[in-house]
Image: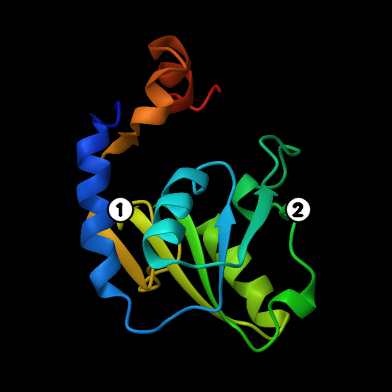
């Protein structure tokens, strides 16, 4: 069964950002953007909220592991992550585009906590149907969806690339 797709426009992204900003109940000392999906939403939020300390986290889960183990149990690999002293004692807003399974953003959140930071999570779309964390959910989100979201910055990659991503081949 193919997952329903939704292709967004830039105007729709602007509305999602406008819906997200008033939800924040605190000011953040830093923003930690998860690559690649969180770069554009994080940049838009950082600019609108005037957050000066913008950091990057790059994490990946192996696409393939041996047949005896589920890839859901794979350990993440961090390619980039800020030093602990940049997070310690700070309120850190962690931004990604989508909370699907929740593995990536939860992994980053746990690492911020381990560094002594106070993590908060924000995404544009939350998909509770794919969530692996029970009642766990993002602290802030602009919309709930059951669709595979295609953002306007992804469309230029070509629909053949988008199709491979949706099918889990890209």
Q: Hey, which quadrant is residue 23 in on the image?
A: bottom left
Query: First in sequence: mark 1 or mark 2?
Result: 2
Nearer the observer, 8 or 52: 52
| Mark-to-mark CA distance, 1 and 2 | 29 Å
Residue 53 spot, x, y in % from top left: 61, 67
From where the camera sits, is residue 68 visible? yes
Q: Circle 1 sits in a helix, a strand or a loop, which is it?
A: loop
The residue lying at 24 percent from left, 31 percent from top is 9
Task: Locate residue 162, reporting x and y percent.
Answer: 42, 20
Which residue is depicted at the point 65% across and 89% down? 89
Single out the mark in the foreground, 1 or 2.
Answer: 2
Residue located at (71% from left, 81% from top): 114
Q: Position of residue 95 (x, y in %)?
A: 48, 59
On screen, residue 115 versus residue 35, left or right, reads: right
Relative to residue 28, is residue 149 depicted above or below?
above
The residue singled out by tag 2 in the image is 80
Front residue (pair 39, 135):
39
Q: Residues within 10 Å of mark 1 (few under 14, many from 20)?
A: few
Please indicate whether residue 118 sits to the left or right of residue 132 in the image.
right
Q: How many marks?
A: 2
Task: Identify residue for label 1.
Answer: 129
Residue 81: % across, % down = 74, 60
Left or right of 142 in this view: 29: right
- Secondary structure type for disc 2: strand
Q: Are marks 1 and 2 in contact (CB under 8 Å)?
A: no
Whether residue 103 is situated above or below residue 36 in the rendered picture: below
**Which label belongs to residue 8?**
none
Residue visible at 44% across and 24% down?
167
Give whichever of 135, 92 is nearer the camera.
92
Q: Quadrant of residue 152?
A: top left
| Quadrant of image for the C terminus | top right
């Amino acid at each position: 069964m193919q997952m329903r797709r939704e292709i967004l426009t830039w105007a729709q992204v602007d509305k999602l950002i406008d819906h997200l900003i008033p939800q924040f109940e605190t000011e953040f000392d830093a923003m930690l953007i998860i690559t690649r999906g969180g770069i554009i939403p994080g940049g838009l939020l950082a600019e609108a909220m005037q957050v000066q300390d913008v950091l990057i986290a790059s994490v990946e889960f192996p696409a393939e592991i041996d047949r005896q183990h589920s890839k859901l149990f794979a350990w993440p690999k961090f390619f980039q992550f800020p030093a602990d002293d940049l997070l310690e004692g700070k309120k850190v807003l962690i931004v990604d585009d989508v909370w699907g399974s929740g593995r990536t953003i939860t992994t980053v959140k746990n690492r911020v906590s381990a560094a002594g930071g106070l993590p908060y999570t924000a995404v544009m779309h939350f998909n509770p149907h794919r969530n692996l964390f029970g009642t766990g959910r993002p602290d802030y989100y602009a919309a709930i969806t059951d669709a595979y979201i295609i953002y306007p910055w992804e469309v230029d990659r070509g629909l053949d690339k988008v199709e491979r991503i949706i099918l889990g081949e890209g």
